[in-house]
Image: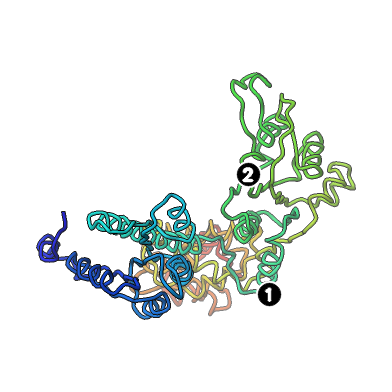
Amino acid sequence: MAVSPAERVEKAPETQAPQRKRRILVVDDEPHARRALVELLSDEGYEVSSAGDGFKALGILREWPCEVLLTDWRMPVMDGITLVKKAREEQPELGCVVMTAFGSVESAVEAMKAGADDYLTKPLNFDAVSLVLSRAMERIEERRELTNLRARHAEHREQSRTKILGASPAVQSLIAMIDQVAGARATVMITGESGTGKELIARMLHEKSGRVDKPFVRLHCAALAESLLESELFGHEKGAFTGASARREGRFEEAHGGTLFLDEIGEISPAIQVKLLRFLQQREFERVGGNKTISVDVRVVAATNRDLEAEVKAGRFREDLYFRLNVIHIEAPPLRARPGDVPLLARHFVAKYAQENGRSIEEVAPEVMSALERYEWPGNVRELENVIERAVVLTDGKRLELRHLPAELLRQSGTTPGEIGVQIPGSTLAEIERHALLRTYEATGGSSAETAEMLGISVRKVQYRLREYREAGVVIEN
């Protein structure tokens, strides 16, 4: 049953914002039929416009966005099928319904191929018209929702993409290299010290490639014994070994179409090296305990913190496998080679862990940044992240200070007593005492007696406190 516009208004929620009527463009070269449709659809609550031919219809569509194009098939100059094709090229979400006096299966198929959502036979039954238009409107909403969902998905994927933070020449060169080789199928070898972000590089290679919608599968080769590693890589058949109660696909099959990241590749045994080499040469393998040859499309990215050239010379790593893996070589720079990136990374980790731990940190003390920049970071970015996470958890105010950093880091970064400042309010009495004693000790040239006299305490207490501070990691020069 048709619902009048007045009834629709009464049923609409009071808080709902007014929406424009849904629009329909009627195209028919017969004036009487065209006017009749316009009146009927207007009574149904639609906003309706009309055109007598296809060219006028295209002009109206460009100036007057609508939901549905309702067009006659047989028209002079431009028929309805051609109009639908051109309209859908310009407006892919437009709903299209074709009217024809020559109803047949063939004509319906032709209309659908042209891009029509539905078709009606003349003479028109208005109940059928109403039903077809309702379905067309539903499809329009589905298309819009799908378009919005894709846009949100693309935005979310862009926001969640792996990023390597840094403005240093070393990082910019690294990112340029990733952009250059990401789209290739060639195997990549990533080398670098522990904690330099080799897995991040592998993920960026995957996300910037045409394989981004396929799996990224990671396997840490050093964590598994030889027998387990073989099964993890290639899978196994039921009964292949004790405990193999069912067939299991390996990482190569899981990564089909995508990327397999083999971390710590330098740790694999000679037997596994042979099987991996065969896959890289032929792109096929058999599961453990099976005889069926399986082919998969996988890009292999390997990583190691070992010197594989030295391993090859020592006979511990196959030279032919090394060359197969090392088609493209990427070196992950250590953090000490890009000290200018430390403040950027530190602020990023402070924000991340402050949010995770419910802390409200508004400032990182300058002396903290200075200490972080002077430190050598043998554990690289991973160590910096751990240090910042610890400092954030220990912070009970809005400012991250030197006292929140590990004593060993302060010692190795050469942090002097004068840098360990206090904040009033915000510091404990012990911190204020330490600051006063160390600054006075510095000012007196390292004289315990003069420090004691100026502060009005005993020499013994000064020496006791100095020993206590040294044990805590504070560098104090005599």
Q: What type is the residue that disc 2 sits on?
A: Ala
Residue at position x 40%, y 78% from top?
A: 62
* Structural crowding at the residue carrying mark 1, measured as other residues with C-alpha within 10 Å and reported as few (<14), some (14–19) or many (≥20): few
Q: Image height check: is 461 above or below 109?
A: below
Coloring applied to the structure = rainbow
Q: What type is the residue that disc 1 sits on?
A: Pro
Task: State which quarter of the image contains the C terminus.
Answer: bottom right
On the question of residue 437 being in view, the answer is: no
Q: Image height check: is 251 above or below 16?
A: above
Q: Disc 2 on helix, strand or loop?
A: loop
Nearer to the camera, 211 or 187 = 211
* Structural crowding at the residue carrying mark 2, measured as other residues with C-alpha within 10 Å and reported as few (<14), some (14–19) or many (≥20): many
Q: Disc 1 on helix, strand or loop?
A: helix
Where residue 222 appears, x then y in whole percent? 69, 40
Dot 1 or dot 2, earlier in sequence = 1
Where residue 210 appears, x then y in whole percent? 63, 58
Where residue 330 appears, x then y in whole percent? 74, 60
Which one is in front in this view, the residue at disc 1 or the one at disc 2? Answer: 2
Answer with left or right where residue 340 lies relative to residue 463. right
Answer with left or right where residue 312 lies relative to residue 336. right
Nearer to the camera, 290 or 164 = 290
Mark pair 1, 2: CA separation: 33 Å
Nearer to the camera, 283 or 198 = 283
Q: Which label number is shown at residue 401?
A: none
Mark 2 sits on what residue? 255
Mark 1 sits on what residue? 169
Residue at position x 39%, y 59% from top?
A: 143
On the question of residue 123 being in view, the answer is: yes
The image quadrant of residue 181 is bottom right
